[in-house]
Amino acid sequence: MAAWTWRFERSDGTEVEPAVQPEDFTTQGDAESWIGEVWKDLQDGGADQVRLFEDGTEIYGPMSLHPEEAAQD
């Protein structure tokens, strides 16, 4: 069974400890639902962006936790 995990980073790519500890997710949808629920807490805790991994392979990222920045693209 695949394990989906998040990496939490500052805007420069430095890894940071998340303000909310994630579980290991069994589907991409579960991982994305979780990030949708807690992104604000993660941002407030010092994370600027996240990367999603499946079994250690990066699927996508970095994805900004600052929606106003994403809207300016």
Image (tube, helix red, strand yellow):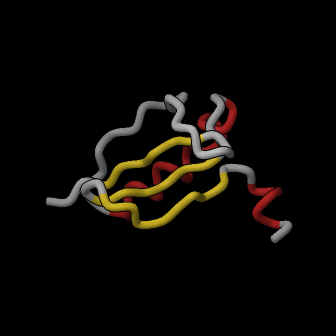
Q: Residue at x 60, y 37 (%)?
A: 42
Residue 48 is situated, as x and y percent measured from the top left of the image, at: 66, 43
Please give left or right for residue 67 compared with residue 50 in the image. right
Please give left or right for residue 35 compared with residue 73 in the image. left
- Residues 8 and 27: in front is 8
- Residues 56 and 32: in front is 56
Residue 11 is situated, as x and y percent measured from the top left of the image, at: 68, 45
Residue 59 is situated, as x and y percent measured from the top left of the image, at: 41, 66
Which image quadrant: the N terminus?
bottom left
Residue 61 is situated, as x and y percent measured from the top left of the image, at: 53, 61
Q: From what the image shows, is residue 72 above or below residue 41?
A: below
Q: Residue at x 29, y 44 (%)?
A: 24
Please give left or right for residue 65 compared with residue 53 in the image. right
Please give left or right for residue 50 compared with residue 11 in the image. left
Q: Residue at x 63, y 28 (%)?
A: 45
Q: From what the image shows, is residue 71 above or below residue 13?
A: below
Q: Which residue is outermost to the left?
A: 1
Q: Which residue is outermost to the bottom?
A: 73
How many numbered discs, if any? 0
- Residues 72 and 39: in front is 72
Which image quadrant: the C terminus?
bottom right
